[in-house]
Amino acid sequence: MQQRTILHTAFRREWLSRLLLVACIGCVLLAAHWAGALDPERYREMLPTLWTLATDAWPPDFERLPNWGKPLLDTLAMSVAGTAGGVLAALPLGALAARGLAPAPVRHLVMLLLNTVRSIPGLLWGIIFVASVGFGPLPGALALACHSAGMLGKFFAEIFEHVDRAPVDALRSQGVTILGVLRFGVLPQVLPRLVDVSLYRWEHNIRAATTLGVIGAGGLGLEIITAFHLFEYREALALIGVLLALVTVVNLLGAYIRRRFLDYTTA
């Protein structure tokens, strides 16, 4: 009887798993059909158009490269300031949103705030701040900071929730001060993951800062959009190359910082 019950439970779980898989596939196909992704007519002119655009953009035109220094610095400044602002806001908010670190009403209120902040797209935040403080890198940095705070706050809360309490309790039982507990019990656990998440967000914000150029936040994004509007495809390709170089440098720098923080926490 018990074996029959076990087999019945296993069969029911397998049947539910298959049903869920079929439902997911059906939802994906329905979404693709709704978006027009299954219409072959939409793809008929795609490859010839892309080829024409590629030939018009090659070779890239770097004639105005000396003039791109300021837009490049604007993009970098927006990403750094926006990420730093997001991290500074997300640290206390993430701690308040973590289970066991704050009363339940406070936690739910902070979670609602974080959900609201990250639900507003970065471009919409940019429009709001452009209307508030004018054009330039400042509205871009504020927009990135707001959206980053919402995303990082959620990730930081999950990191704080998974702190192993055993080392913390052991240090407290030996009379170690609060600073000592944070240094040797909490920091080694959370710092590498906090740095990881923050650096990934910085890498994301480099690309996001480019899209904010569409709404007047300046930087390389504005230069790229202007080049496309003027049908200067060769210059646009050169600007995209500069952006890729910047992203590559940031990725390498982020990997270096991760290694250094890992060495610091394991020392």
Image: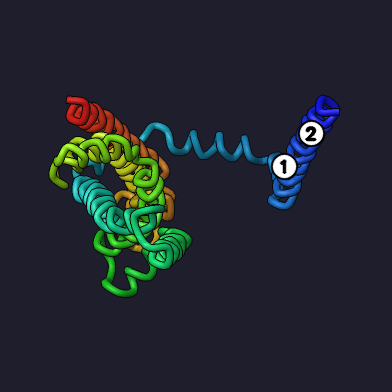
Q: In the figure, residue 14 lies in which quadrant? A: top right
Label 2 residue SS: helix
Question: What is the number of the mark on residue 24?
Answer: 1
- Circle 2: residue type: Thr
Left or right of 181, for residue 196: right
Front position among marks 1 and 2 = 2
Residue at (29% x, 64% y) in the render: 139
Q: Residue 59: x percent and y percent?
A: 39, 32
Label 1 residue SS: helix
* Residue 49 visible to the viewer: yes
Residue at (24% x, 49% y) in the render: 80
Q: Is residue 128 above or below residue 66?
A: below
Q: Quadrant of the N terminus?
A: top right
Residue at (34% x, 74% y) in the render: 131
Mark 1 → mark 2, Cα distance in angstroms = 22 Å
Q: Residue 182: x percent and y percent?
A: 20, 43
Left or right of 230, for residue 44: right
Badge 2: how crowded within 10 Å, few (<14), some, or many (20+)?
Answer: few
Q: Which residue is mark 2?
A: 9
For the residue pair 134 and 14, the one nearer the viewer reads as 14
* Residue 61 visible to the viewer: no
Q: Residue 68: x percent and y percent?
A: 23, 46
